[in-house]
Image (cartoon, helix red, strand yellow):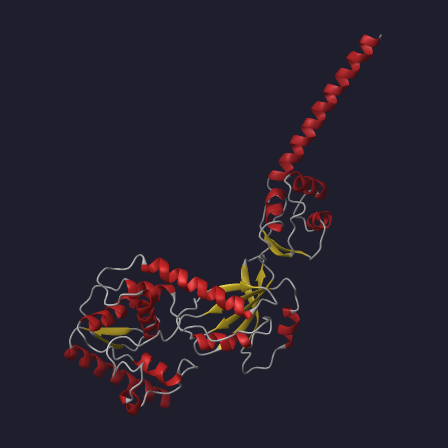
Amino acid sequence: MWRHVASNFLSIAVVVLVVVAGVVAWAQRQYVGPGPLADAICYKVPSGAKLWQVAEGLEEKGAVASAYIFKVGADYEGKAGGLKAGSYLIGPGASMQEIVGIVAGSGRSTCGTEINYRIGVAAVDIIVRELDAATNRYVERVKFDPAVDAVPQDYVDLAEDSDARIRITLAEGVTSWQVVEALKRADFLTGEAGDVPAEGYLKPDSYEVRRGSERGALLAEMGQRQRAAIDALWAERSPDLPYDTPEEALVMASIVEKETGVPEERPVVASVFVNRLRQGMRLQTDPTVIYGLTEGRGVLGRGIRQSELKKETPYNTYVIDGLPPTPIANPGEESIRAALNPAETKYLFFVADGTGGHVFAETLEEHNANVAKWREIEAQQKATDGN
């Protein structure tokens, strides 16, 4: 009898183990397999949320088939305690395992509200936009200049969202003074900006910050990124350049940056100035003259006077030989690359062509002809504007 009971028990135990193994295998397939989400959603994990709360919220949104399996899987992977507050884009068919990786990952929001504080050469503005999860495109909600516009109430309301991503974007060609002044007006930053950093040594780039980030630390990061870029590009420079140090190359890069906004022209513009330096010619570039007048404190806002072209300043390259003593702006990587790897040309001159680009010349005669054409274009534009 006991042998019969033991036999039955073993049979039942085997069946139970088989069933359990089957359930575990099924649950595992549910965890790693495609999820039920048909369309992308933006899911917000509140600060201090518990795993079970997130799991149930995802189940309600239709992102996971089982909150219980989601929680058990996260526990098993050791990620249950790694939840990060934020707003996250969850794509169609995302598995529970993928979603766990998203909400317990870097903590950087990938959807929701984004505040972009853009520091440009001529103006500073704030753009608030939100990601439309269905189209994966941003929709602009607010745009204004904090220096001249009243702060819109929509901005105040959206900025109160603790999960809103904040981004600061530096345009190529801004001066260090412009950057510092703009950061002083950024109401989401704290601390003193300190002294204006050396010209040219802040990297035009996009910087993600948090509300309460310190201005000084942000400026230090901008400086570190720029120096890293200079060091990396200096190692790849062309031989026989007419400047011997990364600092001099940065001066050249800043001139290239201010002379053209057409990306493909940068190596050619650099070649003009390199050719002039090699032949002992003065650079004769207007942006350096302007910097000598403004000291980088904003834009000149008018044409250069003839008296100013003759005025001797350390930056007037119509008067001085060689490079000015410092950069005249913060150049981007492509301008630094162009200064270190200029095109091989014989050009010594260039002038605007009326399309936003320039026309280049090897001789003064060719250049004078190009200038005459540009004067005609200018006259036509003024006549059209007058009408």
Label tally: 0
Quarter of the image where one finds residue 136: bottom right
Q: Is residue 87 above or below residue 51?
A: below
Rendered location of residue 68, percent (x, y): 72, 41
Residue found 57% across the figure and 52% down from its top: 106
Residue found 32% across the figure and 76% down from its top: 325
Quarter of the image where one finds residue 139: bottom right
Closer to the camera in the image, 32 or 323 = 323
Residue 266 visible from this viewpoint: yes
Q: In this view, does 375 lie above or below 82?
A: below
Quarter of the image where one finds residue 204: bottom left
In the image, taking residue 56 as reference, residue 194 lies left or right, namely left
Rendered location of residue 285, percent (x, y): 28, 79
In the image, taking residue 321 as reference, residue 63 lies left or right, namely right
- Which of the image's four quarters has the C terminus? bottom left
Rendered location of residue 380, percent (x, y): 29, 86
Q: Is residue 305 above or below residue 129?
A: below
Rendered location of residue 135, percent (x, y): 55, 58
Residue found 44% across the figure and 70% down from its top: 171
Closer to the camera in the image, 41 or 162 = 162
- Which of the image's four quarters has the N terminus? top right
Residue found 64% across the figure and 73% down from its top: 156
Residue 168 visible from this viewpoint: no
